[in-house]
């Protein structure tokens, strides 16, 4: 089934079936007003391996984390709208940050592809849905995730990168085009770095990345501070 149809069906289902708040579990619409008020963008910019930077809307903990997980794991597409609003703020900030001055080449947005396995399991791509709800026009770049990073969660930072290098490829020639890479959550950044590598090897320029949320470095056991944007 077409992803848009699946998303629409899930949206409709959320209206018909009583749902509990994804943030606190209270009987309410998708997200109660108390939890909704905690979803405030606190834009953060981090530098990834290889010099690529990523702008994120907010930390991946608390209500944000539970909402994103509920959207992804339980197919609660109704959450894509409030989360998409936050993503839109980050995309605007990222374009602002990464747009080189005095150039006529527009910045397009490419999304990090879901692995074939997770797409088949969910039946839709949460990142694509979030981007659409954020009002982002997604460029067709033919980015494919190859051998699945299935064991990714159990690997450390170096292990994740080694596991991922060469796992993605762009099936189109992208010479002369300039991209902002979009994903839902940045943890170590290895997925974004690999997606950027794949786009570049197809001839594209990657100016930076944007994600809805970032995993706070304290949760990663890293001491480096992230740069809070004004
Ligand atoms: Zn709540």
Image: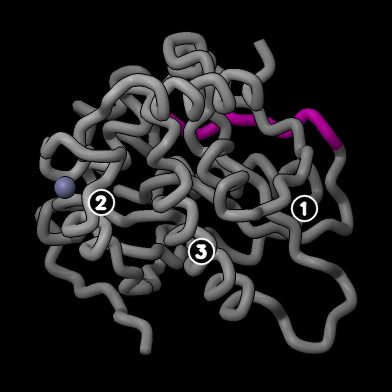
Residue 46 numbered mark, or none: none
Residue position marked by numbered label 1 in the rendering: 204
The span picked out in magenta is 164-172
Q: Secondary structure at mark 2?
A: helix
Q: Secondary structure at mark 3?
A: loop
Viewer-proximal residue among 128 and 6 = 6
- Say if the magenta span includes residue 130: no
Which of the marked residues, 3 or 1, is nearer the chain's N terminus? 3
Residue 52 numbered mark, or none: 3
Q: Residue at point 24% right, 64% down?
A: 37
Q: Position of residue 228 (x, y in %)?
A: 30, 81
Residue position marked by numbered label 2 in the rendering: 64
* Coloring basis for residues: one colour
Which of the marked residues, 2 or 1, is nearer the chain's N terminus? 2
Q: Residue at point 58% right, 37% down?
A: 128
Viewer-proximal residue among 89 and 163 = 89
């Amino acid at each position: 089934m077409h992803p848009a149809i699946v998303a629409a069906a899930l949206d409709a289902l959320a209206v018909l079936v009583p749902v509990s708040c994804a943030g606190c579990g209270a009987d309410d619409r998708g997200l109660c007003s108390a939890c909704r008020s905690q979803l405030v963008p606190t834009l953060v910019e981090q530098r990834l391996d290889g010099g690529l930077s990523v702008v994120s809307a907010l930390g991946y903990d608390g209500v944000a984390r539970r909402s994103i997980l509920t959207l992804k794991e339980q197919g609660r597409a109704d959450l894509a709208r409030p989360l998409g609003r936050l993503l839109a703020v980050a995309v605007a900030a990222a374009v602002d940050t990464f747009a080189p001055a005095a150039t006529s080449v527009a910045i397009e947005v490419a999304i990090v592809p879901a692995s074939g396995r997770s797409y088949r399991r969910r039946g839709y791509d949460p990142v694509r849905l979030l981007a659409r709800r954020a009002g982002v026009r997604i460029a067709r770049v033919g980015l494919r995730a190859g051998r699945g990073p299935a064991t990714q969660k159990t690997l450390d930072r170096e292990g994740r990168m080694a596991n991922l290098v060469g796992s993605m490829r762009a099936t189109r020639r992208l010479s002369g085009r300039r991209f902002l890479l979009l994903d839902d959550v940045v943890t170590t950044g290895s997925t974004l770095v690999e997606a950027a590598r794949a786009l570049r090897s197809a001839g594209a320029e990657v100016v930076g990345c944007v994600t809805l949320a970032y995993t706070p470095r304290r949760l990663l056991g890293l001491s480096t501070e992230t740069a809070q944007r004004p």
